[in-house]
Image (cartoon, grey):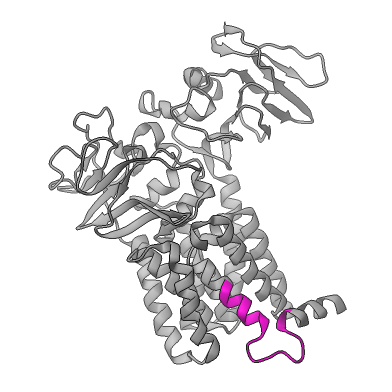
């Protein structure tokens, strides 16, 4: 206890702390960096978030400490929770720091509007934070209506339907939007989906821009350098959470969408900003067809559902953190709000670990949907419609392990392994040897699997304790055999 009190005292600045104690300064800097998306860097955003959480933790009342600790642990397990500014807002309001809470929500609103380059947003918010620190938190009359307004702005994309796509074959492109996969909604009147920007885009409500055709809404020939879960995004809170959940989104985006309207999703990295999804004059504008083609749709179920207003875990996280914040604002039920936040965190983590997906991919490299390896399994959804969802976490039927990667079996029916991949099945480790066997036992480009430090069989296809192990360097070509074995 003595150590805990010393830690709290040091963070508060000690008994002789000046009016602007170190806690407020650090909290202000962290709030600005977090609200501004960490200069486009996800690590900076997460660091700022945990800094605020720790400061709140060590300055909380004793009974609230375990609850805040639960939220910190939950954010570690499920980083998508960090993308909800309302979680931090509620804690800051309870911590009697309304000016810091306003900065967090203001940053969220600016990201949604997209009127400035978000790369400079943390600096702007830090400048706005300075007078609030000087005059203290004497903004009781202003912060409630301000926060309610910003809450409303951020909730609009959640409760307002965007579009209901109709399955339509695009002109000159072999792609189509499958309405059954995206959202089982009724077809609405004049809703029209366009995969081709050479067509009459004035009548289309969904525009998907390609690499090569010239279009006045976009520049083109650009590709993302990193996996999506490594990036920090700007735009609606709902889509930020969805992209955090969809870690295996396709990176070859192709176009930069000119921001002629509301910026729904974009990324800033190293001073450069790229807009991926916009909403202009009632039209949804996508930077590339890979968002909506059957070949990649399985890699982004949360983003796709969120865009077309089908309820997903992203909605649950957002609403579950908004509701406690509104309780604080309207009913001043801080204690109940904090408990609700902790319950939301625990529930969200449980939902991630129990959500059902078709394929769980464990890989050290980008799992490209166009590849012949484990990353390309779900791309066959466009032909046979057999595999629809891919994820990094969840309860899956198929475990796909990339080259040089290791994984632990979690009740999957089929385990697909590339060369030098390892898997722990029960208490025994197995590995795939990178030795080509050709086509064996109905498996194309087969490789043998053996028990590590044992004398087990080295066939490419084995049945062990009710689980099928398949070794191949061309998982995509074997997608039908893999799917059949999982049924």
**In the picture shown, does residue 252 fall above or below 437?**
below
Q: Is residue 381 above or below residue 214?
A: above
Residue 314 in sight from this viewpoint? no
Q: In this rendering, would 134 be left or right of 264?
A: right
x, y percentage for residue 362? 61, 35
What stretch of residues is rendered in magenta? 11-29
Q: Residue 68 appears in which quarter of the rendering?
A: bottom right
| Residue pictured at 65% horizontal, 33% vertical | 411
Specify whether residue 21 is painted magenta. Answer: yes
Q: Quadrant of residue 136?
A: bottom right
| Residue 103 % position (x, y) | 48, 76
Question: Looking at the image, is 451 positioned above or below residue 166?
Answer: above
* Residue situated in front as seen by the camera: 310 or 475: 475
Residue 257 falls left or right of residue 55: left
- The residue most toward the right is 2
Q: 64 or 169: nearer the eye?
A: 169
Look at the image and say whether residue 232 sits in the magenta stretch. Answer: no
Most foreground residue, 363 or 40: 40
For the residue pair 166 and 198, the one nearer the viewer reads as 198
**Count the marks: how many?**
0
Residue 315 at least partly seen:
yes
Q: Is residue 424 left or right of residue 438?
A: right
- The x, y position of residue 19, in whole percent, is 64, 92
């Amino acid at each position: 206890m003595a150590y805990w009190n010393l830690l709290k005292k040091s963070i508060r600045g000690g008994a002789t702390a000046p009016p602007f104690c170190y806690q407020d300064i650090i909290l202000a800097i962290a709030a600005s960096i977090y609200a501004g998306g960490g200069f486009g860097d996800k690590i900076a955003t997460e660091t700022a978030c945990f800094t605020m959480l720790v400061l709140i933790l060590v300055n909380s009342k004793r009974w609230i400490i375990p609850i805040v600790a639960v939220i910190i642990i939950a954010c570690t397990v499920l980083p998508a929770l960090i993308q909800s500014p309302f979680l931090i807002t509620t804690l800051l309001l309870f911590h009697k720091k309304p000016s810091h809470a306003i900065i967090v929500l203001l940053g969220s609103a600016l990201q949604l509007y997209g009127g400035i380059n978000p790369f400079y947003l943390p600096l702007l918010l830090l400048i706005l934070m300075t007078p609030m620190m000087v005059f203290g938190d004497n903004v009781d009359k202003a912060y409630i209506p301000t926060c309610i307004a910003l809450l409303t702005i951020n909730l609009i994309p959640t409760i307002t339907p965007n579009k209901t796509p109709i399955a339509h074959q695009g002109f000159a492109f072999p792609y189509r939007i499958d309405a059954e996969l995206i959202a089982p909604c009724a077809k609405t009147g004049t809703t029209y989906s366009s995969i081709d920007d050479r067509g009459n885009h004035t009548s289309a409500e969904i525009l998907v821009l390609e690499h090569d055709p010239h279009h006045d809404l976009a520049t083109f020939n650009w590709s993302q350098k990193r996996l999506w879960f490594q990036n920090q995004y700007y735009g609606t809170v709902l889509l930020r959470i969805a992209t955090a959940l969809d870690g295996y989104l396709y990176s070859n985006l192709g176009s930069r969408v000119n921001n002629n309207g509301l910026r729904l999703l974009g990324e800033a990295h190293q001073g450069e900003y790229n807009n991926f999804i916009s909403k202009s004059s009632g039209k949804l504008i996508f930077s590339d067809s890979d968002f909506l083609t059957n070949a990649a749709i399985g890699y982004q179920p949360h983003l796709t559902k969120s865009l077309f207003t089908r309820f997903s875990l992203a909605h649950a996280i957002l609403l579950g953190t908004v509701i406690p914040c509104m309780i604080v604002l309207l009913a001043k039920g801080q204690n109940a709000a904090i408990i609700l936040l902790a319950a939301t965190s625990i529930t969200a983590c449980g939902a991630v670990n129990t959500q059902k997906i078709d394929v769980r991919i464990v890989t050290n490299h980008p799992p490209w949907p166009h590849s012949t390896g484990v990353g390309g399994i779900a791309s066959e959804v466009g032909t046979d419609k057999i595999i629809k969802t891919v994820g990094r976490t969840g309860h899956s039927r198929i475990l796909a392990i990339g080259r040089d990667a290791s994984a632990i079996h979690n009740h999957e029916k089929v385990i697909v392994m590339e060369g030098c991949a390892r898997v722990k099945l029960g208490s025994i480790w197995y590995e795939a040897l990178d030795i080509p066997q050709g086509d064996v036992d109905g498996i194309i480009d087969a490789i043998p699997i053996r028990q590590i430090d044992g004398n087990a069989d080295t066939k490419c296809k084995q049945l062990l304790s009710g689980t099928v192990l398949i070794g191949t360097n061309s998982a995509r070509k074997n997608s039908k055999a893999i799917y059949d074995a999982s049924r």
